[in-house]
Amino acid sequence: MEHADKLELHYYFTDDSHNIDAIIRNRCEAEILAILIEAADILNMDVTVNSEAYAEGGFREFWKLLGSHGNQITILLAIVSILLSRIPISDPEIEALEKEIKQLTIEEKKLNIQKLKLELQEKPVENIDQTVIRKAASYVDKSLKFVKRRSNLYSHLTGYHKVQKIGFNILDNNFEPLESERIIDRVNFKKFILSSNKLNSEIDESAVIEIVSPVLKEGRYRWKGIYEETTITFDMLDAQFKEDVLLEKVAFKHGSTITCVLRIGRELDEVGDIKITGYAVSTVLEISDGSDVSETMQGKRYLHTKKLRDSQGDLFA
């Protein structure tokens, strides 16, 4: 592979025109720029992206990358080109992606990426093995931000029916392509789009919440408390605990806390960041007034079931 410093996005139209809706163009450009920056950030590469004069032939746009190391820019462009055009094997389900992401710790990822970066720096670009590119691509493709931004790009294109297909290519300094253009037909755009922004709930099985405002009457009212130094409102889903509160079997005072199983709802926002959508307590394990601690019956059942479940997991492992 020779040195590349440009990424090309080629819009193919259903007619012979050479103009594009300015809003669609700007939205797509924003996603491409975010994708390039996110990929560079994941691989710990320092690059600057410049927009270059566009060309006709449908409508073609070019972005030139500047950086201290030509190898890194070439590999970065190759990776982005691959991942923007490689159709996912299955529907882009966030749940499956999250499972893959959790297989490596943050520290392991940083170490592996650092090793990868050194390899990219030390070898001439023409001697870099394709397995290195695939390995680097696998790290980038596990980024929720990257996946969301790619989904946004194809979502914008899906809504603009003038685009029949798009192509990606990497070019050298003279605008000469270094590989065959990667073409994606409109029929495949939807395969890149996330079916949902919703993530699996995060579960804290020993959450401690200081009760600020309990609900002392029937109805679908939300409780207020302090969790990890943050004031939250939450749904109380523990029916037995709610009944005990209504029957005044449980009393609250300043500093009262509950230890509980807390479900934290999450989803991706438009830029791929994770945002919290709500909190819900499914089981109250313990109640404390600052001095005395009382374990609930449902808490005992939950911990017993959890112990059996964990022991089964150890057995199969």
Image (cartoon, grey):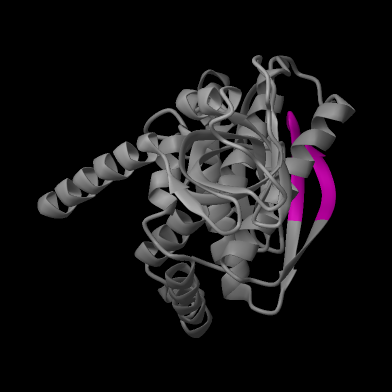
Q: Is residue 110 left or right of residue 216?
A: left
Q: Residue at x 35, y 63 (%)?
A: 131
| Viewer-closest of 282 and 172 | 282
Residue at the limit of the structure toward the right, as seen here:
22
Observer-nearest of 178 and 156: 156
Residue 148: image x %, image y %? Answer: 61, 39
Quarter holding residue 149: top right
Percent x, y of residue 95:
44, 36
Task: Verify whether residue 58 appears in magenta.
Answer: yes
> Can residue 142 be seen from the camera position used here?
no
Residue 131 visible within the image: yes
Quadrant where the C terminus lies?
bottom left
Residue 78 as seen in the image, left or right of residue 66: left
Task: Examine the residues drawn in magenta and state their main secondary structure.
Answer: strand
Q: In terms of image quadrants, where is residue 132?
A: bottom left
Q: Which residues are magenta?
A: 51-63
